[in-house]
């Protein structure tokens, strides 16, 4: 069992995030991660019955990047967007468990700007898109003291495998 | 006067999983102050170091954004509901341009 929290996402949904990042390149894409959380706190021990998976991404809610002024290196999701995403999640029996966005021509690592604007508990998936080609995909959770992100493992596999 | 504060999912880890809490308060600011007194770890996620509500923290009084009311001085009455709704932002390193 891996150390720390692990986020499970299907190949299909991971590909959709990559495709969204390519589609909006050179601008950042963004959207909500809909799914289920099996361990409430960041760093909580995953339960054995969940095969070491602490969270599952079971759907996406792609959003429009509201940052018209600097969409190449910023994204913004309004409170109304958040409410819409929560409604969409609830209608499917899921929660909003996090958010994804792309870093066009930048690595898939959170910036200080990401940290300054992050909420605790949520998973933040970042996909790097280099010259219109999707590269690394990583996931992060803000530490409770807001001083840094911790990497969250991502397990990408076929839905049938779980 | 009891007002109910709805707590968003990412902050429930600091409230013992509670999704709401009730406090006596005459203003929105007083209610939020009571909330962060009872659940101290919430404070740094809602407020900056100089005590201002963070830009991505949206507060509604019965569905009205308090930015369009009297902000934290907005008066409350018995039975009001205050909702804390996140907005989400981020972006790659580098200057906005």
Image (cartoon, coloured by chain):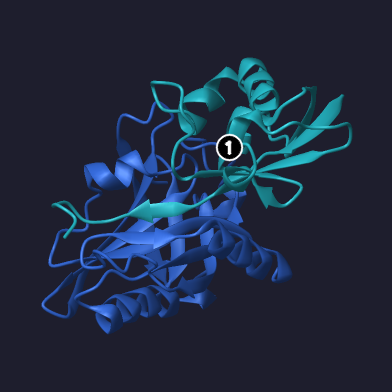
Chain colours: A blue, B cyan
* Mark 1 nearby-residue class (10 Å; few <14, some 14–19, many ≥20): many
Q: Quarter of the image holding residue B74?
A: top right
Q: Position of residue A147 (x, y in %)?
A: 31, 29
**Is disc 1 placed on a helix, strand or loop?**
helix
- Is A16 located above or below residue B88 in the figure? below
What chain does mark 1 sit on?
B
| Frontmost residue, A45 versus B91 | B91
| Frontmost residue, B81 versus A109 | B81
- Is A48 located above or below residue B27 in the figure? below
Kindly identify which residue carries mark 1: B11
Quarter of the C terminus of chain B within the rendering: bottom left
- Is B17 located above or below residue B90 in the figure? above
Q: Quarter of the image holding residue A112?
A: top left
In the image, taking residue B54 as reference, residue B2 lies left or right, namely right
Residue at position x 12%, y 67% from top?
A105
In the image, taking residue A96 as reference, residue A131 lies left or right, namely left
In the image, taking residue B63 as reference, residue B14 lies left or right, namely left
Residue at position x 61%, y 21% from top?
B36
Residue at position x 46%, y 72% from top?
A63
Q: Position of residue A66 (x, y in %)?
A: 39, 67
Quarter of the N terminus of chain B within the rendering: top right
| Frontmost residue, B5 versus A108 | B5
Residue at position x 68%, y 19% from top?
B34
């Amino acid at each position: 069992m891996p150390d720390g929290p692990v986020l499970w996402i299907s190949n299909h949904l991971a590909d959709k995030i990559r495709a969204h990042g390519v589609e909006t390149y050179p601008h950042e894409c963004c959207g909500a991660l809909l799914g289920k959380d099996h361990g409430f706190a960041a760093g909580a021990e995953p339960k054995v019955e969940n095969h070491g998976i602490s969270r599952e991404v079971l759907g996406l809610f792609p959003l429009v990047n509201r940052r018209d002024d600097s969409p190449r290196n910023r994204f913004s999701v309004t409170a109304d967007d958040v409410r819409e995403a929560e409604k969409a999640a609830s209608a499917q029996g899921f929660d909003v468990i996090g958010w994804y966005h792309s870093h066009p021509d930048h690595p898939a690592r959170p910036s200080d700007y990401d940290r300054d604007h992050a909420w605790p508990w949520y998973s933040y998936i970042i996909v790097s898109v280099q010259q219109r080609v999707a590269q690394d995909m990583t996931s992060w959770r803000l530490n409770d003291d807001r001083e840094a992100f911790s990497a969250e493992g991502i397990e990408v596999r076929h839905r049938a495998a779980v | 006067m009891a007002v109910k504060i709805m707590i968003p999912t990412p902050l429930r880890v600091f409230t013992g999983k509670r999704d709401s809490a009730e406090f006596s308060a005459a203003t929105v600011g007083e209610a939020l102050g009571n909330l962060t007194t009872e659940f101290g770890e919430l404070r740094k996620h809602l407020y900056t170091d100089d005590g201002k509500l963070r830009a991505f923290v949206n507060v509604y009084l019965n569905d009205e954004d308090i930015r369009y009311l009297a902000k934290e001085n907005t008066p409350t009455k018995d039975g009001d509901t205050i909702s804390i709704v996140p907005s989400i932002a981020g972006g790659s390193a580098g200057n906005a341009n």
